[in-house]
Image: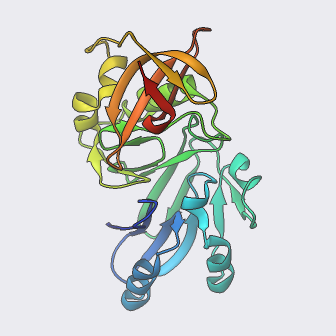
Amino acid sequence: MILQRVEQSDWLSNSYLVVDEPGGKGVLVDGNGVIEPLLERADREGTELTHILLTHDHWDHVVGLGELAKERNVPILAHEITAGKVDFEVDRLLGDGDVIETGNLRIKALFTPGHAGGHLAFLIDDTDLITADLIFKGTVAGTMAPGATGFEDLKHSIMEKVMALPPETRIHPGHKEPSTIGAEWETNPFVRIWRGLDEEGTGACEVKGRGEATLILWAPDYDGTNKAWVRFPDGSDSITGGSQVTLK
């Protein structure tokens, strides 16, 4: 199997080309506006692009895919919720556990809501997982953007679905560099608290547009900024960018 990514320099979002072998069959996962190197490789090696897979509906992961699908006559596959939010046609709906087989590739869709209602991760040949905006190297996704289904969904998706995979499983996030299940299990600060290894914070903070909260965790984010896990007075938890939080 060949798995190649290209990263957009402003959004830091990834698009992936996954191919069973040079000149074989493959899929494109997400679009970030700079997928030309992936398409050039597929064309140069004679790869048949059989599917375009969407992890979720956010613009920095779907830009240009509607046009590409029409140009190349390639079907787009996505969750039903995602299909209802993008401005192009989705040809096939995917649910939890659905499998796409192309060439020698076996790709299993995992329903992983939290950051987005129709979010999917894709497990490829039981060795590699494209996690998109669920978990990244050293951090996790936010749960306060429009369309997010919330903290509890995100935590369940990460701890019950992703972290249950073998530790050697490679993860390929929606932004920045890859990691492994084992590395995130041991070092990801959110996962460590969820495992009960590290204590929750108790400091006070204020969240833009939401008011006072308790700062449970202040952690690095994938883009060099920070990610904050906060708890509001009603007991609800959220994860948001550090720019939205004022520390007290």
Image height of 207 relative to 167, above or below: above
Say which of 248 and 163 sits in front: 248
Residue found at x 38% / y 9%: 202
Quadrant placement of the C terminus: top left
Image height of 55 relative to 3, above or below: above
Image height of 241 relative to 228, above or below: below
Say which of 106 and 114 sits in front: 114
Residue found at x 62% / y 84%: 72
Residue found at x 59% / y 34%: 144
Residue 35 vs residue 64: left or right?
Answer: left
Figure colour scheme:
rainbow
Dividing the picture into quarters, in which one does residue 44 lie?
bottom left
Instruction: Name the spot of residue 27 as percent of width and height, x first.
Output: 49, 69
Say which of 57 and 210 sits in front: 210
Dividing the picture into quarters, in which one does residue 160 lie?
top left
Residue 1 vs residue 63: left or right?
Answer: left
Image height of 79 relative to 47, above or below: above
Residue 46 vs residue 91: left or right?
Answer: left
For the image, the number of numbered tags is: 0
Instruction: Name the spot of residue 168 as percent of width and height, x first.
Output: 23, 42
Residue found at x 60% / y 68%: 63
Dividing the picture into quarters, in which one does residue 96 lie?
top right
Quadrant placement of the N terminus: bottom left
Instruction: Name the spot of residue 212 as percent of width and height, x first.
Output: 55, 16
